[in-house]
Image (tube, helix red, strand yellow):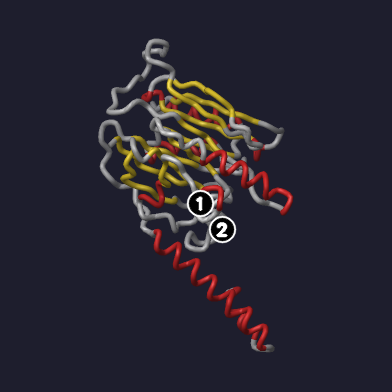
């Protein structure tokens, strides 16, 4: 491992040994922090009327509809947030779901001619009719969607529920890919966290930050579903590494006054994406 390599090299000098010790202790401390947040992902709770299943998956623009649709069906997802997903892929996935008897509304926003800057959202028609209500001032295509008021909505699929269907924020703030990008990263991650403003909101996507990063330290009315379920140590990126070594940067944030988290899990790698999907099982309080 990298830590072992550092220790071997450090034997050549006291200064190197001290540096290596700091790095090893830092890594151990980080694992301790993550371990305290839990490794036990589970979404096997029996589903009840009014429950909501949310799936978030950064597809890297390479996962196909034939790979996405079975994932949605397997987990019975009602809300599916797909960062880095082309509008055409979202529509094709919806077509497969329609054929399988699980029709969805399809929304997407693209800010550049690149899959990285395209975010899609699928919402089960069982939740009633939805519409995009606003765009987020972020660079990679985030937006808000909400139920159409009942008197204006089509009767298709309107589901009686203990609480109204959720407002959804499909989010993908920019990453801290360089020193110059740090200000934008902090601004956008705080902006996304700021959409946790009550009213049963659900915020999901690749947030490019862990709970320890400054942008996600104040979640307003929300809780992180992974943390609430005792699974916040399970990493999602990069998918090529074991989950215990990867970073938990894909999230589902939920209004804790409206939703209880009864399950959360990080799924196995799908297709060629460098992220793992996450799924949260929510229940009205």
**Dot 2 and dot 1 residues touching (CB under 8 Å):** yes
Q: Find the distance from the CA under tag 2 to the CA under tag 1.
A: 8 Å
**Residue sticking out furthest to the top:** 151
> Disc number at residue 240?
2
Which tag, 2 or 1, sits closer to the chain's start? 2
Q: Position of residue 100 (x, y in %)?
A: 41, 29
Residue 285 visible at all: yes
**Front residue (pair 175, 60):** 175
Q: Quadrant of the N terminus?
A: bottom right
> At x 54% / y 61%, what residue is drawn?
241
Which residue is identified by label 1? Answer: 269
> Badge 1: how crowded within 10 Å, few (<14), some, or many (20+)?
some
Query: For numbered disc 2, what is the local secondary structure?
Result: loop
Query: For numbered disc 1, what is the local secondary structure?
Result: loop
Q: Please say if 234 is above or below 100.
A: below
Q: Position of residue 3 (x, y in %)?
A: 58, 76
Q: Please say if 245 is above or below 136.
A: below
Q: Position of residue 248 (x, y in %)?
A: 50, 54
Q: Quadrant of residue 258?
A: top left
């Amino acid at each position: 491992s990298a830590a072992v390599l550092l220790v071997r090299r450090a034997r050549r000098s006291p200064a190197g040994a001290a540096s290596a010790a700091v790095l090893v202790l830092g890594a151990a401390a980080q694992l301790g922090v993550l371990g305290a947040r839990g490794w036990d992902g589970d979404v096997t709770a029996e589903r009840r009327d009014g429950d909501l299943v949310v799936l978030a998956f950064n597809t890297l623009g390479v996962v196909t509809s034939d790979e996405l649709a079975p994932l949605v069906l397997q987990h019975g997802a009602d809300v599916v947030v797909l960062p880095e997903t082309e509008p055409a892929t979202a529509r094709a996935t919806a077509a497969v779901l329609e054929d399988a008897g699980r029709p969805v509304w399809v929304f997407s926003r693209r800010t550049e001619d690149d899959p990285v800057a395209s975010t899609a959202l699928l919402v089960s028609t069982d939740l009633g009719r939805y519409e995009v209500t606003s765009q987020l001032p972020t660079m990679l295509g985030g937006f808000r969607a909400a139920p159409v008021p009942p008197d204006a909505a089509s009767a298709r699929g309107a589901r009686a529920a203990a609480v109204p269907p959720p407002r959804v924020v499909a989010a993908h703030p920019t990453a801290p890919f360089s020193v110059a990008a740090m200000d934008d990263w902090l601004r956008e991650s705080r902006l996304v966290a700021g959409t946790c403003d009550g009213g049963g909101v659900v915020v999901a996507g690749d947030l490019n930050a862990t709970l320890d990063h400054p942008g996600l330290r104040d979640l307003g009315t929300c809780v992180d579903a992974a943390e609430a379920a005792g699974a916040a140590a399970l990493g999602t990126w990069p998918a090529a590494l074991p989950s215990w070594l990867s970073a938990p940067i894909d999230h589902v944030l939920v209004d804790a006054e409206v939703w209880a988290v009864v399950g959360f899990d990080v799924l196995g790698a799908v297709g060629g994406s460098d992220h793992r999907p996450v799924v949260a099982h929510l229940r009205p309080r």
